[in-house]
Image (cartoon, rainbow, N blue to C red):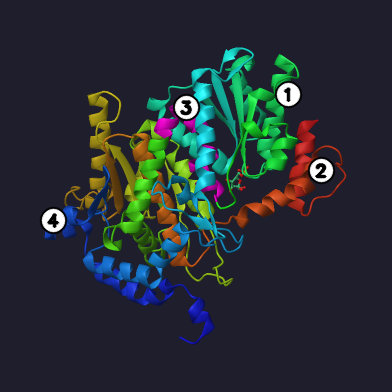
Amino acid sequence: MNDKTLINRPALVNYMEKLNAEKQRLSHQHIREMFADDPSRFDKMSITNDGVLFDYSKNRVDAKTLSILLEVARDSDLEQMRDTMFSGGKLNTTENRAVLHTALRNFSGEPVTVDGKDVMPDIKAELAKMEGFANSVRSGQYHLTGGKITDVVNIGIGGSDLGPRMATQSLREFNDGPKLHFLANSDATDLDDIIKLLDPATTLFIVASKSFTTAETMLNARNAKLWLESALGQDIGNHFCALSTNLEATQAFEISNERTFGFWDWVGGRFSIWSAIGLSLMIAIGPKRFEEFLKGASSADQHFLKAPLEENIPVIMALLGVWYRNVFNFPVQAVMPYDSRMARFPAWLQQLDMESNGKSVLKSNEQTTLDTGPIIFGEVGTNGQHAFYQLIHQGTTIIPCDFFLSATGYGGKENRNMLISNCLAQTEALMNGRTLEEADNNPHRVFEGNRPSNTFLYQKVTPHVLGMLMAFYEHKIFIQGVLWGINSFDQWGVELGKELVPAIEPMLETNKDLKAENSSTQGLLDAIHAMQK
Ligand code: F6P
């Protein structure tokens, strides 16, 4: 082990042979048979934490497979890395930053230090400031020219949009504040569509941007300001507040410090809903329920910290993901909520997972030899069934799926029972399949089955449950990053496209004679100019 390249390799590389042999061993065993052989499989392969049940029994694994995967986790120093993250170690190596979204939901009373400073007092102070503001908006104490605030528009993109938008929608049952709207894309039709619904005199805009430089967000914020000014005149300062780490820029945008809610560089954008970026959600559901949301995430944190690895939900989620990604070479992971309100969960997870683990370079600066993050997609359950489940059941690409199911939900019983039975039927069909004999010798009606899935079950989506589910995925992604030896907390891959924009933009208007880098871009620009005439 003196070879430097070996030392820098993730431990997982050294287990590939063993894991491939394990795959070979299991290749003659169908999950259906594993259930038949062991009536207690569900009991052994399901874990409950704080009202959320995680069933992973419908996977191509048995106790031996799991024990090898757990060995990989231990050999990757997972527990040490986990403790380093929670205690403020600088795991984001390329940006030299701690990774401390967990501190934002730390109710232990224990300090958390970054560079020797306890960050908890600042977190608590900012949370109290958010609570005071949210309460005053909700009660009408903070009012605008037209009176009590009726509508709040969150202007932000990526992590400054996806989390708050998804959570506000998922928790619509608890929205008893002003009506929330979300504006992300720089397409003018988005703002146009929203402002049709608004009374400018009672609308509050929240400009949510960690950097306060993101081009789409700043353009939307400027246009919102112009719209307000044209409707109400110049004095519209109190219609705006900001969520950012960049106080200089918020001031330059003329948003007072009093209405600016800050956070810190150790909160990654896609992990920021627990910080000031959650203000829109807090205004929608109220500070008390926002606290329940934080406590749900905290419950997942405590579980991740304390449950033995073999009974640890995010650890098992991550290991199964690695098993399929690296040993079976399955490139995709689907996520299917049987719950319309959670329709944006897949979109939120896409950024969380793909921006975190869509990497090719190891922390040690070498190129990875292992595949990393999968492609994430998903859709509300029954809608998906009538759209793309055909491929999931019979296509040539096997797609492990995560299903979300609530036992009672919020709707009527008849609808609820239809959702539940559909979800259970799908997971069973994926796992069991149908043999040629069962299909009356018709090969088109054969389902090979043996297709893996996990199911999360809970009574209904509450702030607590949603917080917990989101934090489980955050930890799953962190664990996979550790196993793959990559930095899950930077996002250099989004930069190049951004950097090219300033060179291309002038070619559209002011300097049409500038030539693009290549004939495709130039050809498209020429066609655009012709179509714009
Ligand atoms: O471009 C990607 C990204 O940096 C994401 O990581 C982030 O969530 C999003 O843009 C928005 O960034 P900001 O909050 O700084 O506007």
- Is 84 located above or below residue 43 in the figure? below
* Residue drawn at 71 percent across, 27 percent down: 223
**Main secondary structure type of the part rendered in magenta:** helix
Residue at which label 1 appears: 226
Q: Secondary structure at mark 2?
A: helix
Q: Amino acid at mark 3?
A: Ala
Tag shown at residue 507: 2
Label disc, if present, on residue 40 of the rendered structure: 4
Q: Nearer the viewer, mark 1 or mark 4?
A: 1
Label 3 to label 1: alpha-carbon separation? 25 Å
Q: Sequence order check: which comes first, mark 4 or mark 3?
A: 4
* Quadrant assignment for the N terminus: bottom left
Mark 4: which amino acid? Ser
Above or below, 120 relative to 189: below
From what the image shows, is residue 475 above or below residue 291? below
Comparing labels 4 and 3, the label whose residue is closer to the camera: 3
Which dot, 4 or 2, sits closer to the camera? 4
Q: For the residue with label 4, is its CB less than 8 Å from the closest atom of ligand 1? A: no
**Residue 33, percent across and down?**
17, 59
Residue extending farthest to the top is: 146
Q: Whole-Å distance between the Cαs marked 4 and 2?
A: 66 Å
Q: Is residue 242 left or right of residue 465?
A: right
Q: CA distance from mark 4 to mark 3?
A: 44 Å
Residue in the picture at 27% in, 39% down: 458
Taking depth in this image into account, of 307 and 159 the one nearest to the observer is 307
- Separation of residues labelled 2 and 1 (CA atoms): 26 Å
Q: Amino acid at mark 1?
A: Leu
Q: Earlier in the sequence, mark 1 or mark 4?
A: 4
**Of pointers 3 and 1, the one earlier in the residue sequence:** 1
